[in-house]
Image (cartoon, rainbow, N blue to C red):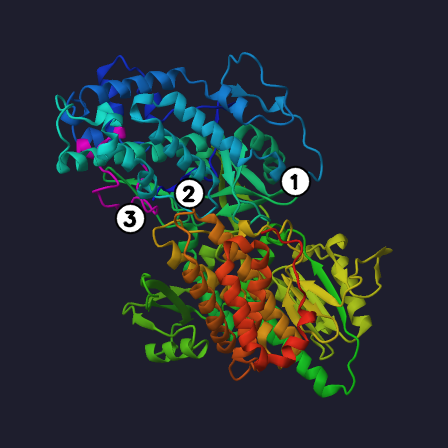
Amino acid sequence: MFVRSRMFYSKPAYNARGEVVFGLRHIHVLNRFPNPSDRAHAIHVLRYIFPRQFNLHNVFTSTVDRKETIQPLKDYTLRENEIALQGGKGSFIPKRLKGKAFELVKRMMRLHRRCSYHALIEYYCPFVSQAPFPSSISSGTTSSSDLSPLKPKESFTDFASSTGEVSAFARAVILNVVPTEFWGSEENKKGFMRNVDRFVNLRRYETLSLHEVMQGMKASFFSPAHRLTDPAWLCPPNTKDRNLSQSDSLKRTQILSEFVYYLFDSLLIPLLRSHFYVTESNIHRNRVFYFRHDVWKKLSEPTINKLKVEMFVELKSDQAKRILDSRKLGFSTVRLLPKETGIRPIMNLRKRGMVVERGRTILTQSINSVMTPVFNVLSFEKTRKPTALGSSLFNVREMYLKLKAFQKHLLSTYKTPLKLFFAKVDIQACFDTIPQKELLKVVNALLTEDEYRIHKYAEVKAPAPAGKIAKKFVAKGGSADGFERFGDLVREECNHGLRRRRGTIWVEDVVQAYKERDQLMGLLEEHVLVNIIKIGKKFFRQKSGIPQGSILSTILCNFFYGDLERKKLPFASAPTGVLLRLIDDFLFITTDRSHAQQFFQIMHQGHPEYGASVSIDKSLSNFEVMVNGRKINRIVDTKEFPYCGNLIHTRTLDIRRDRERKIENIVDDTLTVEYSRNAGRSLHKKAVSAFKFQAHAMFFDTDFNDLQTVLKNIYHNFIEAAMKFHRSVKALSSNRRPSQNLLIKIVDDVLEFAFVIVKSCQDSKVKCVVTRAQVKWLGAQAFKTVLARKQTSYRALIKWLEDTTQGEKKKVRGLVSRASCLGVDPFPSFRY
């Protein structure tokens, strides 16, 4: 697999005037050894392209040292130390690379020197606000002052270059830099360029393998019918008219594979890195956006400058180095994630630093790894003192259990249903505004033990068919004097979710770690008060808030706002209401209108001691209410209240998933398709997962929801799964698409497994009276509704679905009569 993740979130190169420079980076081998007339330079480049022939580290025969990289394959941008250790200053050239191959590499070096990367990117990826492409370009730079200012509230993703433009640019560069003789035939060149286009168009987590690229090239290179198109540079000297032996064919494949891998890994990926800021977005899920570096600089500069003024304090380089050398914690970096109308800063605290040890560059622990013991101890205190968290929610199940308990209380207390008042507020930039010293005071009061024990163990889960064994290393905090047998710990884990733990083996780590309270608090103070961030070449200290992206950020935020609730919102704990909070999103549901109004009033007055301020524009209610002379937004023409991706019925508290509010509901953006040789097996796995991913007990509990709501939830799950199924099939090339019989088997398995998933949610607290026939009929009806629009591709499957719905019709007569309530096309805004 090509390590595609390397092209994301790259930084541009600048000249002395601070302008973005286009072209391959100065550290690229074609720039460090640019002279094709110098034999030593050409041989050095040859080593980078064909490392296996020089017995250097390569992806084909070498193993990756996990102390050097976390990537599946090594980065070969710089090989100088390895070449020097091998004594690589000599003039040796392997026999296979002498002659034509060597001359083509020298020509490639010349073409690279002549290639105008700046002119090509201006032509193929023009910025829409710029003047037309000039007739002559004398510089490889672009000044940010040449770009027109952005309009307020304009979507940042509108300024990205399209994948078609990026693909055209990448293909143009390769055609300009790689000599034509390297391809051997026009078919090979076209096949390679198709894979370049495919590589650029892949989604965030999709990959492309060398094997897939080579499939399109083998026939032309090696079949007897195409001997005349064999590239001359692959032929050994003086063997032009000889028959092709098997060993010679394998050797040619080996050399060709090295060349193709180099083009993708060391030319295409660095090319995209040096010209584009490649990122996903906050609203488009897995779609990848390519921003020209000069455009991204213009977009991101205001946000970066604002961060430097409001959140960060600049440190001198020697001061930052002195702090970093004196502690285990390294520095974090910031990347920016495009939102609908802005950019969200994300701190990367999982990145591992690098140090040189005995001449080797090895990885150090990430900040999150160093802070893991503190997280384990805080998690232990969380279980011991749940009241300290207030109304905090750590997952969806906790919201469901609180709502169900509140619903049960209302039904047992009041004979007739009372009107419920909903009040929702959102704290602005909660992670960035929390007062650091006040937060540390709250945590200091929580840690009551002098010493804590960290119990480590491993969970090994049995693999799915044709899958891999899943290993997970877990650590759990506890008091130093509180002995807990490993068997009791495992039993407790099982009781929290027996079905989720099925097929799991627990392995105990005999050695347990002990941490003193003062040591943990000292580490936390360093993390919060002296969080060092590197932006460009400068170091900064975060002066307010807590690091967003830290393993501790969520639990610290929950403890801190739990303290706010106890002191400012004591009325919210009354039995007439329930308060929910997912990090900074508050939702208060009550039967007392005055309490709801009081909640709005208190939250909107602001609390500087907690760094909490609320935007009135993001507040929402289901009744008329005014705060400080301004009306709070309210829901109209609906009885369903949105909260954290769900819709809560304002009378019955029934819950269903909020799918309609997704911006640009393009199903393709949610997918990750595997283009492997096991495409059918992968499609089967993804189809089942599409339903399972949306399945949760709160959607299927008939004690909590009305039966009609549960049926609608199941049906809508199937609708979304069917859309993803169709788009996954269409994403595969025609020769890889499964047969109609296999598609029928996949859908049949989805319908059968869906009932297992629905019933698996049932336990002592959850009841689901939906039958197998009902689930199967709903699934068949949903798939038929979606695929009926694409009949030409699924004739046999649609016929099978019609037979299935007819076969189950007698068992679900009551359901069929109510099917109109499900909606023929429940998601008209979804594009699939």
Q: Earlier in the sequence, mark 2 or mark 1?
A: 2
C-alpha gap between disc 3 and disc 2: 17 Å
Q: Is residue 528 above or below residue 201?
A: below
Residue at 69% across, 66% down: 587
Q: Residue at x 51, y 12 (%)?
A: 138
Magenta highlight range:
48-75
Q: Nearer the viewer, residue 671 or 68?
A: 671
Characterize the local packing of mark 2: few (<14), some (14-19) or many (20 or more) Cα atoms within 10 angstroms: some
Q: Label 3's element?
A: loop
Dividing the picture into quadrants, the one containing residue 542 is top right
- Element type at marker 1? loop
Q: Is residue 59 magenta?
A: yes
Q: Amino acid at mark 2?
A: Ser
Residue 380, image x, y percentages: 46, 70
Where residue 757 sits: x, y (%)? 49, 73
Numbered tag placed on residue 155 in the rendering: 1
| Residue corresponding to mark 3 | 66
Q: Position of residue 537 (x, y in %)?
A: 47, 32
Task: Report if residue 540 lies within the magenta region.
Answer: no
| Residue drawn 41% across the image and 57% down it | 739
Q: Disc 2 marks which residue?
A: 5
Quarter of the figure that contains the N terminus: top left
Report the predominant secondary structure element of the magenta stretch: loop
Residue 55 in sight:
yes
Tell me which amino acid carries mark 1. Answer: Ser
